[in-house]
Image (cartoon, rainbow, N blue to C red):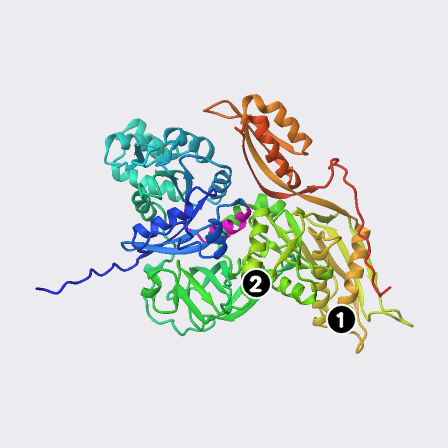
Amino acid sequence: MPPSHTPRAPRITRTVNIGILAHVDAGKTSLTERLLFDTGAIDRLGSVDSGTTQTDTGDIERERGITVRSAVASFTVGPAQVNLIDTPGHSDFIAEVERALGVLDGAVLVLSAVEGVQAQTRVLMKTLRRLRLPTLLFVNKIDRAGARHEGLLADIRHKLAPHPVAMTAVRDLGTRDARALPRSLDDPDFRAHAAEALAETDDALLARVLDGPPPTAAELRAALAAGTAEGRVHPVFFGSALSGEGVGALVRAMVRLLPPAPGGPGGADGQGGANSQEGADGADGTAPRGTVFAVERRAGAPGKTAYLRLFAGELAVRQRVTLHRHGPGGTPVEYTGQITSLDVVGRAGAEAGAGRLTAGNIAKVRGLAEVRVGDRLGPAAPETNADTAAETNADTATEAGTTAATGTATHFAAPSLSTVVRARQPGPGPAARLHAALLTLADQDPLIHTRALPGGATSVLLYGEVQKEIIAATLARDFGIEADFEPSRPAHIERPVGVGEACEEIARRGHTGPWATIGLRVEPAPAGSGAAFRYETELGALPRAFHHAIEETVYETLAQGHEGRPVTDCVVTLVRSGFCSPVSTAGDFRGLTPVVLERALRDAGTRVYEPCHAFELEIPHDALAPVSAQLTAAEADIADARETAGGEPAWLLEGRIPAREVHGVKRWLPGLTRGEAVWWSRPSGYRPLGRDRRKPDVRPLTPPAHPFP
């Protein structure tokens, strides 16, 4: 009897990195589990309810049944490797989602056939369309009572994507016997329907539909792939993650319709590189370039694990790399470290060679002690989605593109809430351990921006109350620290309204105090630009250490701000400097800089701003008057109100509202709209605090007590 041979798996020639996104409870993690099971990546189907899924690995995620951090898993379909990035569904973790978007080649947005288009679904789709990220829609739970098909397609067209293409039909909808039936372009009826849908965004195809000859099935497949890749059309698949119905059609679409990662593994020669050092390039001489989109630090495990997507070049174990990030005020910060361990996600890593990461793939990297989420390897490149996001969101960045406390540029709004955390156990030891633990969590999410306060407390920025609960649970479980959180409050900022200047000089005779001369000018800068430091003095006028002491202290003082409110969107200029050798020290300049800066700010005057949310609100036609009145009472600015097209008569309101009023709106809105309102909002910059925003109060900073005159 001839020996049997296991067929050899085809070599990986293309990689596609896909994010799975959804409103909470739409079935996102269950779909990820089904994709891995049906493609043979796992041999047992896990469950969210039982806490046995592959991507929700944290104890808190398993207990609560929600995704908190992005996780990566992979499967292969023929010569294609698909890396799945499972992202959080709760709106409190939107920053985690948007960080993941910067490393994706495409996305799958999951909807529930029962609940339909929900608030977070619309937020996510707006972001995906703004980034022009190729997206497939998967309508889950077709086997649940109340599931919809045609009506939901109409909602998708009206509320999410104007040009959906339904790729599956459904039989026995809303029953346990529900079946998803893939539709083929070889079928003349579906071919005609698809041609009309695709022609809405393709003039050449429209001419063929109107004037003939009709496009062939092959031409429509190419048009569908091109339209999907360009974000003009959105294929829609119906199915059930629980039963597996419709998942096969979705898998085929992932590898046929979503574009692969540029510079993927197909271009790698698989030779050498394992011992390359600093500056090592890829096989084509390209310098390595990538983004860190997630950082893990498991309890009891040494060091950090960074998830890095490589866009160009190659990386290897023992290679020294330089990471870049923006520090306070947007100042560039570099950190160099050596990779001690590198595990490439999926089979592509084994084919490239042990400890070797090629372009287009994702790896778990260890050895970089100071790595943080958002760090970049190499210079920024416009072809990455992270940079596309920064470009296409320039209008958002103008208002909210810098975190209030750090001035760090982002393509998503900063958290709009703040809280103060204290260790439940008294004493300096527990307070120090709490602050260290929060700093560790800030490596995973820099936007929480921990800041030490007098008395051992720590200030933390938040997106919402669920995020606060997760932080508290993580402190208790992973660090053994019981902590108390103060009630959340809006995270206010201050901006200078005029130009102010102050100077302190070394006296010619009888000098007391710091041996330093410092003159600073403060000027307002455009909203969203953050804080900047400049020189009008000659750089050689002071020793380099003294220059660094002034600049670092300026940023620290602005971040600390007044009564916990950071000062941002300003330019601070050093206009005068001097020292007395050999008695002057860097400590003299660090001690005097806050005094001079606060006097200059007091001279300029500052204005307090509060965080706002941009909102969209769809309400029944007869609810316009009472809802508008309540929104006005809540200090909302309604920028647009228009009647919706199609479906039941309704009004769509758009505008901005103070973050402090959002929770209240959600309480009274159902009563005024019979529970039919659809509300979504997200942080969106700042506006002057107070009802009369045209002439807000100008508040000078109170000078702090200081031993120096």
Q: Nearer the viewer, residue 375 or 487?
A: 487
Instruction: Determine whether, in the image, residue 565 is placed left or right of residue 243.
Output: right
Confirm whether the magenta stretch covers residue 625. no
In the rendered structure, find residue 260 and report the number of the disc placed on it.
none
Element at badge 2? helix
In the rendered structure, find residue 479 and report the number of the disc placed on it.
2
**Residue indicated by mark 1:** 587
Residue 513 drawn at (x, y percent): 85, 69
Q: Nearer the viewer, residue 206 or 657?
A: 657
Residue 659 drawn at (x, y percent): 64, 41
Residue 360 drawn at (x, y percent): 39, 58
Residue flagged by tag 2: what amino acid is it?
Phe
Please say whether residue 554 is visible from this viewpoint: no
Instruction: Determine whether, in the image, residue 109 is placed left or right of residue 673.
Output: left
In magenta, the rendered stretch is: 92-108
Q: Residue furthest right?
A: 510
Q: Mark 1 or mark 2: name the one nearer the start of the chain.
A: 2
The residues bearing labels 1 and 2 have C-alpha atoms spaced at a distance of: 35 Å
Instruction: Determine whether, in the image, residue 249 is placed left or right of residue 125.
Output: left
Residue flagged by tag 1: what amino acid is it?
Gly
Element at badge 1? helix
